[in-house]
Image (spheres, rainbow, N blue to C red):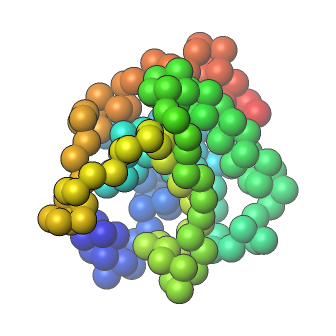
Amino acid sequence: MEYIQRAAKSGGCIFCEKPREKRDRSNLILARGRFCFVMLNAYPYNSGHLMIAPYRHVGQPALLREAEFVEIFRLLRTFLIALDKAYSPSGYNIGMNVGRASGAGIPGHIHLHVVPRWTGDTNFMPVISDTKVLPETLDQTYEKIYLALDDAVKSRLVNE
């Protein structure tokens, strides 16, 4: 939240700025499509927490162009397969917070959260100390998911 609030004060949008920088690995961008991209959440709820966003700055799903809408869900399918391969989660939380009232940290730019879940993956730490314990670094998560994408999928991402 600290990063989001700092970006909001500067008038910036991470979903617009990060893809423009062309530093995908350091910006945690796992894949780029023609209209959308996939990046790890820098402050994940669980290992493997990623987000899928259009390049275009748009705040409502109803305002997505057809190609953006379709590509978000193609990327979702691709990354669910990769996350299954990399982590074997018990389930997923998949969703968007649309608008400030819903809790969206960046209400002007929609993004789909994909959070792998395991039975019993919550414990006392978030409740008692507002702390989430993750078993790996973001670099390790990035590598694990990227390696789980097969070469055919990696070469198709931009072409779909």
Q: Give coordinates of residue 128: x percent, y percent.
A: 17, 66
Image vertical order of residue 152 relative to residue 7, above or below: above
Which residue is farthest bottom?
101
Seen from this angle, which residue lies furthest left? 129
In the picture, measured across the screen, residue 28 lies left or right of residue 52, that is: left
Quadrant in the picture for residue 49: top left
Query: Can residue 149 be seen from the camera position used here?
Result: yes
Looking at the image, residue 95 lies above or below residue 60: above
Looking at the figure, which quarter contains the N terminus? bottom left
**In the image, residue 74 above or below residue 54:** above
Residue depicted at x 76% and y 71%: 63
- Residue plotted at (36% across, 40% down): 47
Looking at the rendered image, the quarter that the C terminus falls into is top right
- At a point 60% along the width and 59% down the height, the residue shown is 95
Report the front residue among 78 and 33. 78
Q: Is residue 31 visible?
A: no
Left/right of residue 114 with respect to residue 121 in the rendered view? right
Q: Residue 51 or 26: which is nearer the viewer?
A: 51
x, y percentage for residue 20? 47, 52
> Quadrant of residue 4 in the image?
bottom left
Q: Where's residue 99, x and y in %?
A: 57, 80
Q: Nearer the viewer, residue 40 or 156?
A: 40
Determine the residue positioned at 84% across, 56% down.
66
- Tell which of 58 and 23 is nearer to you: 58
Give the mark count.
0
